[in-house]
Image (cartoon, helix red, strand yellow):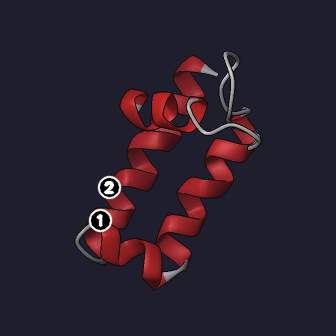
Amino acid sequence: ARRHVEWLRGIPGTPGGGASGPPKAYLLGLAEMYVADERFGANYGGQAGAEFVRDALTAFAEREL
């Protein structure tokens, strides 16, 4: 999850870009989108992979943001 957040920081012009990184609501929204849209899930090995990424990002956001 931390690497994902670091990757988001590196994308200029997005809510996650820059030194401050993504706001908590933005990260949680992305996490839910990865599960809700099967096109994203395909990048994570299917539904189970997308759910794992969502859960990891959610835990990170709750703990770190």
Name the residue tied to disc 2. 52
Q: Residues within 10 Å of mark 1 (few under 14, many from 20)?
A: some
Name the image quarter holding the N terminus: top left
Residue at the image point whose x is 69% and y is 24% from the top: 18
Residue at the image point whose x is 74% and y is 32% from the top: 23
Q: Find residue 30 and report its horizontal and vertical position in percent.
A: 61, 56
Q: Find residue 52 and report its horizontal and vertical position in percent.
A: 32, 55
**Vertical position of residue 42 compared to residue 25: above or below:** below
Q: Nearer the viewer, mark 2 or mark 1?
A: 1
Q: Could you say whether the residue bearing mark 1 is in a helix, strand or loop?
A: loop
Could you tell me the amino acid type at mark 1?
Answer: Tyr
Could you tell me the amino acid type at mark 2?
Answer: Phe
Locate residue 2: give its quadrant. Answer: top left
Quick one: which residue is furthest to the bottom in this view? 38
Q: Could you say whether the residue bearing mark 2 is in a helix, strand or loop?
A: helix
Name the residue tied to disc 1. 44
Rounded to the nearest angstrom, the CA distance separating label 2 from label 1 is: 9 Å
Quick one: which residue is furthest to the left in this view? 45
Q: Find residue 43 and report its horizontal and vertical position in percent.
A: 32, 69
Q: Find residue 63 and report its horizontal and vertical position in percent.
A: 53, 21
Residue at the image point whose x is 69% and y is 37% from the top: 12
Q: Is label 2 in contact with label 1 (beta carbons under 8 Å)?
A: yes
Q: Residues within 10 Å of mark 2 (few under 14, many from 20)?
A: some
Residue at the image point whose x is 47% and y is 41% from the top: 57
Horizontal side of 29 relative to 2 (left or right) equals right
Horizontal side of 61 relative to 60 (left or right) equals right
Name the image quarter holding the C terminus: top right
Horizontal side of 34 relative to 53 (left or right) equals right
Locate residue 56: give its quadrant. Answer: top left
N-terminal of the two: label 2 or label 1?
1
Locate residue 8: give its quadrant. Answer: top right
Horizontal side of 46 relative to 41 (left or right) equals left
